[in-house]
Amino acid sequence: MARWLMALPPVLFAGLAGLFYAGMYRDNPGELQSVFVGRPAPVLPATTLPGIPGLADADLRTGKVTVVNFWATWCPPCRAEHPVLKEMAGKGVRVGGVNIMDNDAKAVAYLAEEGNPFLGVATDPNGRNRVEWGVTAPPETFIVGGDGTVLFRFVGPLVGTDYETRFVPELEKALAGQK
């Protein structure tokens, strides 16, 4: 029995080292894979912010690409990407929002003060729906095709080089495919 227990740590180490080695040679080791890419978008919450149009599942199936952004007022990276969302909306991109684990009054005040880029906002006050979408933490953004299929998932704020090199080309590809 003791010999078996002595062999266990090297075997576990070798297995873990093999997993790490294989992980280094993935196409993009920093990218979190989404099980929803290529599948229908999960259900959106039915709750909304007072005085702001809601975002419904039908909004994701209009024949037009929609960007769905999970955000919160307490999230500094969400605040950093907000001007990019407004710019997208200004260029005619359909941007929907899901406000997660936030205070409705603070969210409404934030959108009134900073501008509302969203065609509609659903709320997920307890964070249950974000789990259905596979969202780990805000901000996370999905590109959804006109038929409601998730085309791409972007983790993190829509700013900087990562945004420009990964998100923008995927959005342009999706928009070009809807014409």
Image (tube, rainbow, N blue to C red):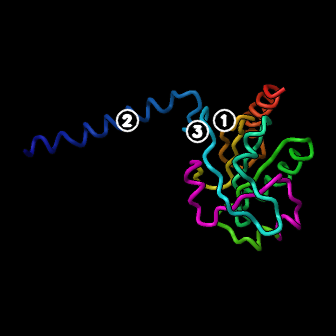
- Alpha carbon distance from label 1 to label 2: 37 Å
Residue most extreme to the bottom: 105
Quarter occupied by the N terminus: top left
Residue sitting nearer the eye, 151 or 154 = 151
Q: Amino acid at mark 2?
A: Ala
Q: Which residues are magenta?
A: 109-134
Quick one: SS at disc 2? helix
- Residue 37, percent across and down? 61, 35
Identified at 65% across, 45% down, the residue is 155
- Percent from the top left, x then y, of residue 169? 77, 30
Callout 3 amino acid: Phe
Q: Residues within 10 Å of mark 1 (few under 14, many from 20)?
A: some
Q: Residue at x 24, y 43 (%)?
A: 9
**Image quarter (top left, top right, bottom left or bottom right) of the C terminus:** top right
Q: Quadrant of residue 174?
A: top right
What residue did someone put label 1 on?
A: 149
Question: Quick check: is 127 in the magenta stretch?
Answer: yes
Which mark is on residue 17? 2
Q: Which mark is residue 36?
A: 3
